[in-house]
Image (cartoon, rainbow, N blue to C red):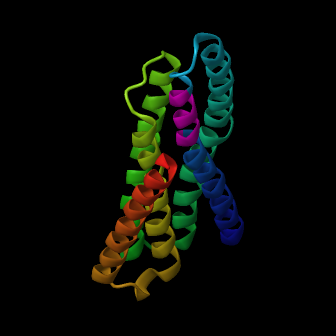
């Protein structure tokens, strides 16, 4: 039973992350559409709103909920709560906070409020990547991972990600 629950947990994590990766991209496109001429803007906003709604409520939210169902169920079947799992749960809580922040942005954009630039949204899009790396490393490496080296590795990864974002911004300007 445990392996079936684990498989379902992984499946819904993957689909949840698909939504978390794509939703901010739709925010970027919708924000950039806001700067277009009126006729084009209306068409694009209507299309992006439909895409965001289908992604958010058809894939992302259901996957987040089912991840939350199968994760604790798996933990229950495991019968123990090791230290690495406590740290992973902290990152998962952070990931849900990120999810709620995307929901807030989604609601704002539906009301025509564009508080963030497309560049800020591109950066915010990468937060899910940081959570993905941290959570997968904890789930796979588990007890073999030093907390100190794990933090150093995560900070190094974040610095690489920030550098890549800056390089991409420079390339886009050219």
Q: Residue 73 is drawn in which quadrant? A: bottom right
Q: Residue extending furthest left?
A: 148
In the orientation shown, which residue stands out farthest toward the front? 174
Report x, y in % for residue 76. Answer: 52, 64
Q: Residue at x 51, y 49 (%)?
A: 172
- Residue 158 at what x, y percent from top left? 37, 65
How far across and down, in percent of the image, does residue 85 sit? 42, 70
Q: Is residue 114 above or below residue 138?
A: above
Q: Is residue 32 visible?
A: yes
| Residue 79 shows in this picture | no
Left or right: 43 as drawn, with respect to 83: right
- Quadrant (top left/top right/bottom left/bottom right) for the N terminus: bottom right
Residue 26 covered by magenta stretch: yes
- Which residue range is magenta in the image? 24-32
- Which residue is at the front of the view, 94 or 46? 46
Residue 132: percent from the left, percent from the top?
50, 62
Up the image or down, 60 lies above or below 78; here it is above
**Dividing the picture into quarters, in which one does residue 23 lie?**
top right
Classified by dominant secondary structure, the portion drawn in magenta counts as helix
Residue at the image point whose x is 60% and y is 45% from the top: 22
Q: Is residue 129 magenta?
A: no
Residue drawn at x 49%, y 55% is 171
């Amino acid at each position: 039973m445990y392996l079936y629950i684990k498989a379902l947990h992984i499946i819904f994590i993957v689909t949840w992350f698909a939504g978390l990766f794509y939703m901010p991209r739709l925010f970027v496109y919708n924000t950039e559409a806001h700067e277009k001429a009126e006729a084009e803007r209306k068409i694009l906003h209507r299309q992006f709103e439909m895409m965001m709604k289908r992604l958010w409520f058809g894939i992302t939210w259901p996957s987040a909920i089912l991840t939350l169902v199968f994760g604790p169920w798996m933990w229950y079947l495991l019968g123990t709560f090791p230290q690495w799992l406590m740290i992973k749960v902290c990152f998962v809580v952070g990931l849900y906070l990120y999810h709620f922040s995307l929901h807030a942005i989604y609601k704002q954009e539906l009301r025509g409020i564009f508080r963030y630039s497309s560049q800020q949204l591109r950066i915010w899009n990468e937060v899910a990547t940081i959570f993905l790396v941290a959570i997968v490393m904890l789930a796979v490496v588990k007890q073999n991972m030093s907390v100190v080296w794990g933090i150093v590795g995560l900070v190094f990864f974040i610095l690489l990600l920030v550098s890549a974002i800056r390089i991409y911004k420079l390339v886009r300007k050219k």
